[in-house]
Amino acid sequence: MEADQASLAVAASKVAFAYDEKTIFRDFSLQIPEGSRVAIVGPSGCGKSTFLAMLGGHLIPTAGDLVVRGRPRTVHQRDGIFPWYTVRENLAIAMGAEIHDGARSRSDRLVEEKLMQWGLLDYSPLYPAALSEGMRREVEMACALSGRSSLLLLDEPFAVLDALSRQELQRELIRTLDADRKQADVVRTVVLVTHDVFEAVALCERVIVMGGRPARIVADIAVKSSSVGDRMESVQEVYRHLGLENTPHPIFDRDMT
């Protein structure tokens, strides 16, 4: 997918990366326009999380050009919030607000508004250790989306959650991202790594199917989103490129008669 270089959040050209003498990437190229939502799917070990780590600056390519514009924030599979700070303090840090015990400031009010938006106000004085896994995930997502990052990198952020918690957090993520797009001063790019094809199609507008070693792009799919039927067509297209053409959703993979 070609785009004007000035409008790209990510521009990877002939990128290579090796680890312990194993070549993960060689001549890998991908462009991601600013403000887009892109999912990366593929079998385990194909380099999805490695690529995300390069985008976040945690790994450096061994060759090629990788240009990342904006300020990245990664939400990992495990907790990324500070265990020694309360929920309120974690959110305040993410928003760049001051932490103090004195008179309420404007930043205090902004933090409180975010706590209310995410349904976290009652949990604001608690430390992460006192929260469930689902609540900690919600706090981390609230921090990531309330901060100043323009590039949100999501590395299977919902994988550890139960089905209901996962759906609730996915809906809140979509609501927040849609609200961002209505603000002229907010341009946020999302790159999601997931093994869940339904999640990829529901949350993103474009799905990159990766495979092989060294990693390569098997397919670059524009998600059809005008109806549920269109989205299901996109799901099936992704499955085909994964070599799982007739794989249904697990809820239908049983005799319901």
Image (tube, helix red, strand yellow):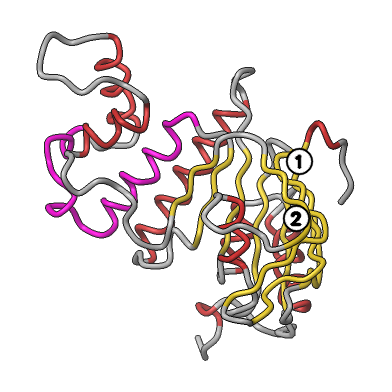
Looking at the image, residue 109 sits to the left or right of residue 70; the answer is left
Q: Secondary structure at mark 2?
A: loop
Name the residue rendered at 77%, 79% in the picture: 240
Callouts 2 and 1 close, C-beta under 8 Å: no
In-front residue for pair 124/82: 82
Overall secondary structure of the magenta stretch? helix
Q: Position of residue 198 (x, y in %)?
A: 60, 65
Q: Residue at x 12, y 42 (%)?
A: 126
Report which residue position mark 2 lands on.
223
Instruction: Report the amino acid beneath label 1.
Output: Pro
Neighbor class of circle 2 (other Cα within 10 Å; few <14, some 14-19, many 20+) is: many
Q: Earlier in the sequence, mark 2 or mark 1?
A: 1
Let me know if residue 140 is in the magenta part. yes
Q: How many C-alpha atoms fall within 10 Å of the one at disc 1: few (<14), some, or many (≥20)?
A: some
Residue span colored magenta: 121-148
Where residue 36 appears, x then y in whole percent? 70, 42
Residue at label 1? 33
Kindly state the secondary structure of the residue where label 1 is placed. strand
